[in-house]
Amino acid sequence: MPYRGSSQSPCQAGPQSGASAVNSSARPASNGFAATPTGASPWWTDALNDPWRDPNAQAAVTVPGRPADPGPPLEPLPEERPSGGGTAPMRVVFLVVFITALLAGGLGGALGYVVAARSGGGVATAPGDVPPLAKRPPKSVAGVVQQVMPSLVTVIIRKGDRGGNGSGFVVSADGYIVTNAHVATGAGDDADITVRFHDGETARAELVAAAPNTDIAVLKVKRDDLAPVTFGDSDGVAVGDPVIAVGAPLGLQDTVTTGVVSALDRAVSGSEDDPADAFAAIQTDAAINPGNSGGALLDGAGRVIGVNTAIATLKRGEDDSGGNIGLGFAIPVNQAKRIATEIIKSGKARETVLGVQVDTGYQDANGGVKLASVDSGGPAGKAGLEKGDVVTRVNKRALYEAIDLVALVRKYAPGTVISLEYRRGGESRKARVTVAGSTE
């Protein structure tokens, strides 16, 4: 707080040997120096009794001349206190205050320099140097995005005077790019597809193939110098993990948003009535909007763990829907990578099937998915399931709606053995099923 005037000095010193308080009384003279006359200026300097004076130095005592008009007499100083309770000379008080201020200023400056140096701020740099704050740690969001951005693209679709855009990412140095099927085929088979890279360069792309039910498509550009992404493991993702979504929402290229994994194996479908295109999604609160489709969902290390595909919105009108409300969904990268690899190798992809038809109208307070029909020669039929059975769990994960069964089964590659729990009548049963593959 600011210093306020007081009847007492904020700093006081006790009496010292060889020093005495200054007052208006005359003092005996010594060594030929005249004593201060009674009533002389209180600012008289008693140099001989100065405790800081070099005794071998010559004395020089200066008495200021009296002005022509001295004005009213100065108020006399207080009487000298007895030894042990005297007031230190004003010069000592001022000296202590001055030294204290210097020490405080020096200490504060030193601490400020250390903090600034450690935080990277407030330190002057030579012209042309990169400011310390611009040197992001490699594991920061800025550092991760900087490393992966050359592998991310914007997919531009044109057909006549109509157009749109989505996002994608490079999966091989020789020009293969993954995006959503609804991005690559949304404008029809004869649409022009252009890929724009982070550095602004563009290339015409061809559609290799698309898997509509799994919403994955592969594009090919004539380049052999591309930087592919690094794939993560979507089976190792946990709720709460930090994620980064990168894409071109509403055409705004290289937009970066962040969030966390909000849920896993969330059954999502583009149709409310038909679960044919359902998938077990990674749910995130990272902002995803139209144009993000096909773009990469990254983990904290910059590895792709999902393909941003869908969002939940609050509909504002029959033909108009709202934007991001914190409910975004991505296809797990293990599933997307498997589909894309099959397309690159053979030009087509297999869809994982159980060999059943589900009853979309079935509802039960205890959950479960009722089988409307079972192919006797299919995976479920071979494992003993029948029409009317109610499947309650897949690999211990509970099912509540028909879309849950379709989405979870599709998550696994053909040939994988999964565990099913189901009810027949009032009896609970279990079965191990080897899922099959069907070409889309």
Image (cartoon, rainbow, N blue to C red):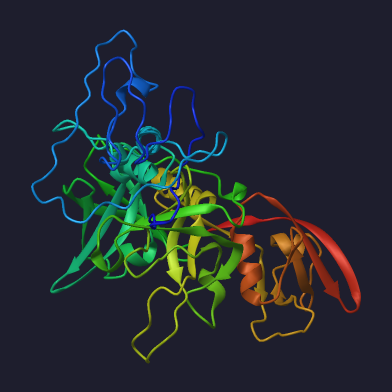
Q: Nearer the viewer, residue 25 or 315?
A: 25
Residue 374's quadrant in the figure?
bottom right
Picture quarter containing residue 193?
A: bottom left
Residue 164: image location, x then y, percent: 24, 69
Determine the residue positioned at 51% across, 70% down: 277
In the picture, measured across the screen, residue 130 lies left or right of residue 378, that is left
At 22% from the left edge and 64% from the top edge, which residue is drawn?
157
Q: Number of marks in the image?
A: 0
Evaluate whether residue 117 shows in this view: no
> Where is residue 172 shown, x and y percent of the image?
35, 39
Q: Foreground residue, 38 or 47?
A: 38
Residue 344 position within the rendered picture, expressed as x and y whole percent measured from the top left: 39, 45
Closer-to-camera residue (35/139): 35
**Residue 142: image x %, image y %?**
36, 46
Quadrant of residue 3 in the image? bottom left
Q: Is residue 301 left or right of residue 180?
A: right
Mark yes or no: residue 43 visible. Answer: yes
Q: Is residue 18 above or below residue 189?
A: above
Residue most toward the top?
A: 56
Report the quarter where the N terminus lies: bottom left
Instruction: Identify which residue is drawn at 26% across, 24% down.
Output: 34
Which residue: 21% across, 20% down?
A: 60
* Vertical position of residue 89 compared to residue 435: above or below: above
